[in-house]
Image: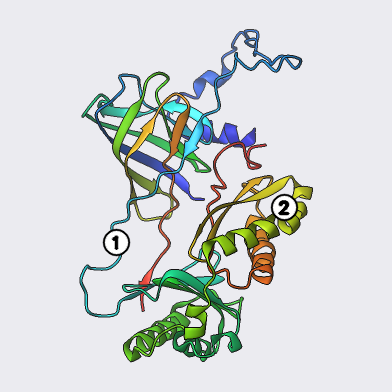
């Protein structure tokens, strides 16, 4: 597991959004995003980032405390120590007060043509 | 707790450090709600959320509609095996595990690979080949991977069939695989890992490939990979010889796992 310097999230909301602040859970610590632009309301795009500077055991995007949040697409740009920056994309999912989604992916393993 | 301290100190490096010499009046710790042990009432606690595992959107590793045979090699992080992904099907809908040269008889692809010096075992699954090597001390896969890529390409170009006809015609049904694997889990694997507070469950069967999940003490355990490869794989293949790929879908970083307890 690498040391995460920063990560930046971009969430495209579908028909049903939320007006609550968006939180993530890093190693079981629930925190709000920083540098937020846009929103998680219906049809809108939310962007937020966080300077973590710690080792990632788990990282999740937390559902709203009330109502449902229909997500069309989530893109996360990771900047980890001793790794090239990489981006991970997740597809459609609906979050609510009982759920959170895993957004952590280890850096891609080096692949080569043979 | 050291970890938590490191985590927060790492995040807030720009916080003023002068305050460390300022005396701060200690306020009494807030009262932490405790569950009632008799009634089991946990209503004061925030609910434990379910972690959803959403598939990553893959952007594809090969250009579309290429006539050329393209092969990518991807060594595992532990270096003990290498995954070769080919831009065409090798065994549609099924998988097959070749444990040694004898098992590769009449299968041109596996025969060609076992002719290479350092190849120990071969798993063919859909459009991938996973190879383990005999010499576990070598971590550089590039020389062997190039030879393996050449052998796969030659077998594909020769087009004499990649897998023996007797294997294809004798592939078991999903029900046979499910029954056999579930029996091994219930009678052999789970009683074995129960001593460590662990459990294994069968999530899915597709063709003759199975997907399992490790739970309890196995989830997040540092020896999970060893348990999987030396214990579970061996038991499965001994009891159900026609089982192909064995996938582990355990998220060892999620939930209330041993990392944090």
**Chain letter of disc 2?**
B
> Closer to the camera, B80 or B230?
B230
Query: How much space separates mark 2 and mark 1, taking CA atoms?
Result: 37 Å
Seen in the picture, residue B87 relative to A13 is either above or below; the reply is below
Residue B73 shows up from this direction: no
- Please identify the quadrant where the N terminus of chain B is shown: top right
- Please identify the quadrant where the C terminus of chain B is shown: top right
Mark 2 and mark 1 lie on one chain; the one further toward the N terminus is 1
Q: Mark 1 points at which residue?
A: B60
Residue B124 shows up from this direction: yes
Where is residue B92 drawn, in percent x and y?
Answer: 39, 71
Seen in the picture, residue B119 relative to A45 is either above or below; the reply is below
Instruction: Residue at 34% x, 19% y: name it.
Output: A20
Where is residue A89 drawn, in percent x and y?
Answer: 32, 47
Instruction: Residue at 48% x, 71% y: name it.
Output: B95
Instruction: Residue at 62% x, 8% y: name it.
Output: B27
> Closer to the camera, B104 or B149?
B104
Few, some or many residues within 10 Å of mark 2 (<14, 14–19, 20+):
some
SS label for mark 1: loop
Where is residue B148 drawn, in percent x and y?
Answer: 44, 83
Instruction: Residue at 65% x, 14% y: name it.
Output: B32
Few, some or many residues within 10 Å of mark 1 (<14, 14–19, 20+):
few
**Chain letter of disc 1?**
B
**Disc ID at residue B246:** none
> Closer to the camera, A44 or B39?
B39
Q: Mark 2 points at which residue?
A: B190
Where is residue B158 drawn, in percent x and y?
Answer: 34, 91
């Amino acid at each position: 597991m690498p040391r995460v310097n920063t990560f930046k999230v971009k969430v495209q909301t579908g028909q049903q959004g939320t007006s609550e602040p968006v939180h993530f859970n890093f190693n079981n610590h629930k925190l709000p995003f920083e540098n937020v632009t846009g929103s998680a309301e219906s049809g809108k795009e939310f962007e937020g980032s966080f300077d973590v500077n710690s080792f990632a055991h788990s990282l999740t995007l937390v559902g709203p405390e009330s109502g449902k949040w229909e997500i069309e697409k989530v893109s996360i740009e990771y900047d980890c120590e001793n790794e090239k920056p990489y981006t991970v994309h997740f597809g459609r999912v609906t979050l609510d007060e009982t759920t959170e989604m895993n957004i952590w992916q280890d850096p891609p393993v080096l692949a080569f043509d043979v | 707790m050291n970890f938590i301290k490191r985590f927060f100190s790492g995040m807030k490096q720009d916080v003023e450090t002068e305050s460390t010499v300022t005396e701060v009046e200690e306020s009494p710790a807030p009262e932490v709600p405790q569950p009632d042990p008799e009634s089991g009432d946990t209503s004061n606690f925030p609910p434990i959320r379910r972690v959803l595992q959403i598939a990553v959107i893959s952007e594809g590793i090969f250009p579309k509609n290429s006539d050329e045979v393209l092969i990518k090699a991807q060594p595992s992080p532990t270096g003990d095996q290498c995954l070769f992904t080919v831009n065409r099907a090798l065994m549609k809908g099924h998988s097959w595990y070749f444990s040694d040269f004898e098992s590769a008889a009449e299968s041109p692809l596996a025969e060609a690979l076992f002719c290479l010096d350092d190849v120990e075992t071969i798993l063919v699954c859909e459009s991938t080949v996973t190879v383990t090597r005999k010499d576990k001390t070598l971590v550089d896969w590039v020389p062997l991977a190039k030879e393996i890529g050449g052998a796969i390409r030659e077998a594909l170009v020769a087009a004499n069939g990649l897998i023996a006809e007797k294997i294809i015609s004798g592939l078991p049904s999903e029900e046979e695989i499910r029954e056999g694997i579930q029996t091994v889990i219930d009678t052999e694997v789970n009683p074995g890992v129960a001593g460590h507070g662990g459990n294994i469950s069968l999530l899915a069967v597709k063709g003759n490939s199975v997907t399992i999940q490790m739970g309890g003490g196995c989830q997040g355990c540092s020896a999970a990979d060893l348990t999987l490869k030396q214990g579970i794989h061996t038991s499965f293949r001994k009891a159900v010889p026609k089982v192909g790929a064995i996938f582990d879908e355990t998220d060892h970083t999620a939930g209330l796992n041993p990392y944090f307890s």
